[in-house]
Amino acid sequence: MEKYLSQLNEAQYEPTVQKDGPMIIIAGAGSGKTRVLTYRIAYLMNQGVDSFNILALTFTNKAAKEMKGRIADIVGDGEAKNLWMGTFHSVFAKILRFEGHHLGFPSNFTIYDTQDSQKLLGSIIKEMGLDKDVYKTKQVYSRISSYKNSLITVKAYFKNPELMEADAMARRPKMGEIYANYVDRCFKAGAMDFDDLLLRTNELLTRFPEVLAKYQHKFKYILVDEYQDTNHSQYLIVRALADRFQNICVVGDDAQSIYAFRGANINNILNFQKDYDNVKMYRLEQNYRSTKNIVGAANSVIEHNKTKLDKIVWTANDEGDKVIVHRSLTDGDEGRYVASTIWEEKMNNQLPNSDFAILYRTNSQSRAMEDALRKRNIPYRIYGGLSFYQRKEIKDVTAYLRLVLNTADEEALKRVINYPARGIGQTTIDKLVVAANSTGKTIFGLLKEIDTVNINLNNGIKNKLRDFVTLIESYQVMNQTANAFDLAEHVTKTSGLIREFNKDGTPEGVLRLENVEELLNGIKDFVEGQMEIADSKDGLAEFLEDVALATDLDGDKGDPNHVALMTIHSSKGLEFNHVFIVGLEEDLFPSAMSMNTRSELEEERRLFYVALTRAEKKAYLTYALSRYRWGKLVDSEPSRFIEEIDDQFLDIVTPIEERRINPMLSADIFGDVPPNKIRFKKAVQPKFQKKVAKKKEPVNFEISAPKKMKKASEVEAPADANLFDGELTVGNRVKHLKFGRGEVLKIEGKGTDVKAEIDFEFGGLKKLLLRFAKLEII
Ligand code: ATP
Ligand code: MG
């Protein structure tokens, strides 16, 4: 038996080596689902399945990267690189680049991130003369997102009286029109938003059977991790692709389904057996991640959910410490308790910072934790927050680059047309938008004809607009020959952006400059990995795609030895030695907004189950008796979830000092007191009256999207690959690490400058510099 297969228990081994046919693994947290998926891919490859024919969909790109790394350890680097592995969004963005032309999209289409989408919606709402307090952009955006994820197109919307009525009841009767305008404007701008990446893929696979057949044939083996959190749109894509060969393996845990609020449908996992014939169902029961106390505590909580599949989770691991429950007076105290406990654990046991994670229900809770960690000089990092690429200065630079590639990109244009200031005012921009809407032209198209179009602008303004067009066109010319790095550097200098950031001289300005520099470094890295591509246009497009789909969740910049802070939603699939779950209070966790129905409350409970099962050795549950929320100090009660845990797994501690310190004075002294503990037997006696959800600030979830920049090292050729050695001729069939198979159409140039034009199966037409291209003749 192969060595890696011996690292599986019997229950894991069986699904790993079942090569063909549909299969589902439903199993609890930490039981090795992701390990089975990983090893199964290695096994398939060892069985002769071509790595180009395997598609694996993961929850984050970080997870994909880790899986790839592990597979590379088993089968070797080169082959692992050919796997199509990533999130739904990144994988299908890639397919849409190749195939989007069927739907009328340019291959350089822009991906609008949430910020871009919301800005566009804001303008549409304004242009339509609607009340922005009724039509709040965030709400309108999430409504449209939910239509898209249920595959409700504009046409379908207007055929559905119930939907229209629901929007009218919510005092937003114009939702449908906004939706229609939004879709038109994105299309005209050559842009797709995050949801479009799935919706348009579905459209592509439904309307173009030959495209469907091509990808069905390519992806002979499909694997999906975290299947319980797929939404309808994702479900249909998987189903369509797997239909031909039915070699589909999905893994998941119904008890960890936590994205219903974003359209995830738990029935996808429950009904899998109905979707395919002869589905093999596997269960894994042994947890390898956590101690007996943690597994026991998690099991006892999830028992309270009525809707669930019966599952057994046990572990042969040590009993370990009991789950610690800690009460603080205020959120500040809670932060100090967490920081001082981490500090003590580190000192007493020589542990690295990266052994610790702090998980919370809402992003706003991170502040108190950050303050306390900073005071103790404990390095930390917040995951899933604003991504590097969403920072203002970075968006400013990338907006120029986006415009170079796609002048139709309305949001990019609006962002930079008067930034840095060029004397082109909002009134002018508004006039242009109106004219563009009424003529069907793009704004940039109008600008190019500014002398002849009928817009009421004075000559001074027209000159400025002409200058702007000239500037962008000069970048486009440069883009014909220069690489993405040289172009980006040139853009930052000549657009005036650098001068602008330099000008204010504040620390923030300096930080902005540093960030721009980091961006340029990133582009350089990327370009080096792409050297082989003579046609730099694609390099830039691909880089911008990575940027659009990047989140901080995927990033691994800087020193990896830090405490991780993140929302529970972002922590799915991860594991840490010590886990602090903070803010375990009624109305916060479970969230006040989730107490209206049983199903919402059960989703909160699953969320708690996810949090608790991230811990390997020690779990801490903390709550505060009062907390600053919405600028006010409010009293809170411990979460019902603490009460639901079986006593035998808990260690309820409260610092002795708490009782002799005046709560009003406690904030500064209490936290630094070492946690001398006294034990109470179930001191937590919350009154769990049902609460009526009051009007609260909306809870801000993190959308964890994908992808980080590719590093040069990731795209390099493997040492053992059979590389092109100079005998390439027209008509040769070749294989490329990234673009798949292709045919050589033309060879040109001399010496080190020889280029080949190749028509790739999945890359389309590419001109490659042979000196760099890693081609294999097949
Ligand atoms: P989750 O539901 O949280 O996603 P999972 O079911 O995907 O969990 P894994 O992450 O695959 O579980 O495995 C949990 C931990 O147990 C990992 O550290 C993994 O390496 C380890 N593990 C899994 N199977 C075995 C095994 N047979 N022997 C030793 N360790 C194992
Ligand atoms: Mg997993």
Image: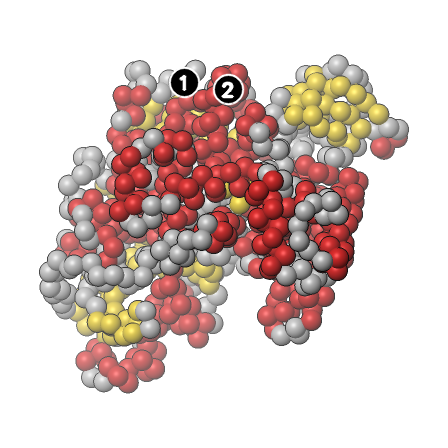
Measuring from the top left, give residue 734's x and y in whole percent.
69, 20
The correct choice, above or below, for 671 with respect to 467 in the image is: below
Horizontally, residue 762 falls left or right of residue 16, namely right
Q: Position of residue 643 (x, y in %)?
A: 15, 58
Q: Nearer the viewer, residue 549 or 233?
A: 233
Q: Position of residue 282 (x, y in %)?
A: 29, 27
What's under tag 2, amino acid-wise?
Phe
Relative to 68, residue 491 above or below:
below
Label 2 CB sits under 8 Å from any ligand 2 atom: no
Quarter of the image with the N terminus in it: top left
Q: Kindly identify the residue that appears in the image at 21 percent across and 71 percent down.
A: 635
- Label 1 packing within 10 angstroms: few (<14), some (14-19), many (20+): some
**Left or right: where does residue 740 sit relative to residue 380?**
right
For image coordinates 44% across by 25% down, the residue present is 222
Q: Which residue is mark 2?
A: 208
Amino acid carrying label 1: it is: Asp
> Tag 1's secondary structure?
loop
Q: Which mark is residue 243?
A: 1
Classify 773 as above or below 441.
above
Circle 2 crowding by C-alpha within 10 Å: few under 14, some 14–19, many from 20:
few
Q: Is residue 77 left or right of residue 648?
A: right
Circle 2: element type: loop
Q: Quadrant of residue 665?
A: bottom left
Color encoding of the figure: secondary structure
Can the viewer see residue 649 in this picture? no
Q: What number of labels is visible?
A: 2
> Residue 372 is drawn in which quadrant?
bottom left
- Residue 264 seen by the camera: yes
The answer for how far apart the CA atoms under marks 1 and 2 are is: 15 Å
Quadrant of the image containing the C terminus: top right
In the depicted view, which residue is nearer to us: 584 or 599? 599
Disc nearer the start of the sequence (1/2): 2
